[in-house]
Amino acid sequence: MAKAKLKVGIIGTGGISWAHIAGYKKQSELCEIVSICDIRPEALNEKGDHLGIDPSLRFGDYESMLSKGPKLDLVSVCTPNNCHCEHTVGALESGAHVLCEKPIAGNAKDGETMVKTAKKTGKRLMVGLQNRWNADSQAMKAFVDKGALGTIYHAKAKATRRRGVPTWGRFYEKAYSTGGPLIDIGVHILDLTMYVMAAPNPVSVVGFCYDHIGTKKAARFGPWGPWDHRKFDVEDYAVALVRFEGGLSLLLEASWAENQADEQFNFQLFGDKGGVQLSPPRFYSEFQGYLTTTEPMLPASENGHEEEIRRYIEAILKGDSAPTPTPGEDALKVQQILDAIYESSAKGCEVKL
Ligand SMILES: NC(=O)c1ccc[n+]([C@@H]2O[C@H](COP(=O)([O-])OP(=O)(O)OC[C@H]3O[C@@H](n4cnc5c(N)ncnc54)[C@H](O)[C@@H]3O)[C@@H](O)[C@H]2O)c1
């Protein structure tokens, strides 16, 4: 007899839910999306019609979806950052595993509640940090894991844009997003860098956040058009130096609007035997007394979101012994650093973790 498919629900059917829908559709032999929820009927019905979901299984509030809809095995939380904790905790307590979009939550305290709830309920919490699964990231991780860099002592992580303020949703309104580029794209590059170098625990942070461009009627020829500078109340640029156990340091930069040449999404790791950078992928070392630069030939990259969902479902089906890819604990460690950067910037001092 064929095994029953995992029943999936989605909370928040805005922009990023398309990526989750595509990921679940690719695993259609193993799972099916059976119910969806959004407070905006137009977003709900667009995805509901696309998926052919009966109107009775399209919900305007998540509690109804969880209590009145079919029992779910897995829930994707795709709502704004300030909702992640409530929706994830609700879904975990209903008995579902949760794939929550990044960042784990609006702040580390909420993230901790989510991780604790996952432990209490015995369900998995994974966070959507899909860049880990790209071919270049995996190659860099393999170099590091095999010891090619020797002892890593410093890292640089950068996710910056000249003019790239997201203009859909509520990304630059603090009440919903809880922060700007640091929590939006800085979270991706920080997580990726820490994942690749298997970073130890963070110890302290010095951070600076600025809003010189976002809050002004600045030139704005970004890919997503103009933003409303009167509503912009988050940082547009953040820079921080993070100290980890053992003396390892990491310099992080994140911006949506910065007077620089172009967009960058990159990390560099510096070790005593070699160094790597993500973009373009390079390995720097010495050979027979000469400096060498290696350009790895990479396989075609999987779609990060689809690969994330494939790995998550695989782990769920394998059972308790299989680790959760991108577990809540990893994303919480990242969030603790982001919180500390905001705190350090506000207080003008180093913050201990
Ligand atoms: N992994 C990535 O690369 C990536 C990319 C984009 C967005 N995201 C994350 O995904 C999340 C959503 O971003 P988006 O771009 O889809 O934004 P969006 O505004 O397009 O979608 C959010 C949806 O949530 C709905 N919503 C808000 N409050 C709700 C509630 N209480 N109950 C049910 N639905 C509610 C909104 O109506 C909207 O349709 C954010 O946390 C963002 O950081 C991740």
Image: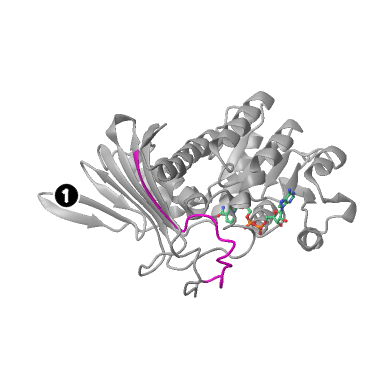
Q: Is residue 69 left or right of residue 290?
A: right
Instruction: Give x and y (percent) for residue 189.
Output: 44, 50
Residue 54 higher or lower than 82, as above or below? below
Residue found at x 54% / y 56%: 233
Identified at 45% across, 41% down, the residue is 343
Query: Which quadrant of the figure contains the C terminus?
Result: top left
Residue placed furthest toward the top: 120
Q: Where in the figure is residue 226, as x and y percent of width and height?
A: 56, 72
Ligand 1's image quarter is bottom right
Magenta: main secondary structure equals loop
Q: Provide residue 123's location: percent of width, then percent of height.
A: 66, 31
Task: Report if residue 71 is visible in the image.
Answer: yes
Q: Nearer the viewer, residue 353 or 331?
A: 353
Q: Is residue 29 left or right of residue 126?
A: right
- Snapshot quadrant of residue 324: top right
Q: Residues within 10 Å of mark 1 (few under 14, many from 20)?
A: few
For disc 1, the marked residue is 286
